[in-house]
Amino acid sequence: MKEGRDFQSRRSFIFTPGTRPELLSKAFESGADIVCLELEDGVAPDEKNKARQNVVKLLKSTPVKESCELVVRVNSLRTRFGLDDLVAFLDMLPPLTIMLPKVESEDEVKIIDDLFLESNQQINLQVIIETNKGLEACFEIAQSSPNITALFFGGVDMAADLRCSGTWDSLLYARSKLVHAAAAANIDSLDVPFLDLNDENGLLEQATLAKELGFSGKGAIHPKQIPVINSIFTPSPEEIAYAVRVIEEFKKAESGLVVLDGKLIEKPVLREMERKLAFMNQES
């Protein structure tokens, strides 16, 4: 959470294709923190123009639940479809959140910033890192704009680009590098969706691993996965209680460290404790 921004819970996200606008209400009802209107991989090339028209209409006419963040995943800026997407959304009323796929340099982000600044439009950006080139530049990408709110890990495309399997272990370095970049920029990081609908234990395991690594949330391919993901990334009552104690101890302390329950705690831990408390305040 960047300085000056209100806290936004981003435990889970789900896509709904721009070709199926009637599915948006079901996506809102799923309990996902982020609902993403899809114009990229989930839409065939000959349907992209129609999908874009549908999404523009939806954004103008659909009320959004306060607890849900509505996002549009456009096509890559390095394609004609992506450029057409951006032109279509330049005239939308702010605020608008755009998810940028396959970002490989900070310049791509800065171009978006400049376009919307010129149009006097407020914009929030979410960036997907899913190529080897993007991974190499992800630290600089995360720092490239104050409008970036989150980095997303595109594990399927990343595995293909790295010529590795898509297992947790084979992508651990890539995930770690993305989490590091997001944490340094004080923004959220979200893990790739779990693709096996019939393996709830696998989803539970991978969501837990993602949380332990430092991710803020994880994607879903079906609404039935959302409750499991939300449960993993929601701070427990014990975590909230501990965060309150840590914050109170630092308020009383005259130094950058405190001892709580016999354990030394240094001041950088405060940021994570404050995030947990912000989550509780948002839920209440």
Image: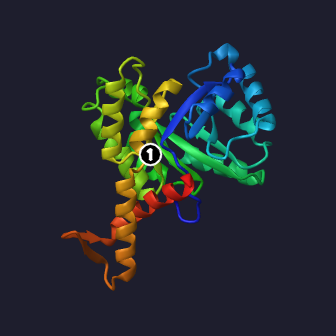
Residue at mark 1: 189
Residue in the foreground of this view, choosing between 177 and 236: 236
Q: Residue furthest left?
A: 262
Note whether 254 is above or below 176 in the view shown: below
- Residue pictured at 73% horizontal, 27% vertical: 52
Residue in the foreground of this view, choosing between 137 and 204: 204
Q: Tell me the quadrant of the picture where the C terminus can be found.
A: bottom right
Note whether 222 is above or below 259 in the view shown: above
Horizontal side, residue 21 vs residue 106: left or right: right
Q: Is residue 230 visible?
A: yes
Q: Position of residue 218 (x, y in %)?
A: 44, 37
- Residue pictured at 26% horizontal, 69% vertical: 265
Which amino acid, mark 1? Answer: Ser
Note whether 151 is above or below 186 in the view shown: above
Q: Residue furthest bottom?
A: 254
Crowding near the residue tagged with mark 1, few <14, some 14–19, many ≥20 C-alpha atoms within 10 Å: many
- Residue pictured at 18% horizontal, 70% vertical: 262
Report which quarter residue 26 is drawn in: top right
Residue in the foreground of this view, choosing between 215 and 110: 215
Task: Provide the secondary structure element on which disc 1 rests.
Answer: strand
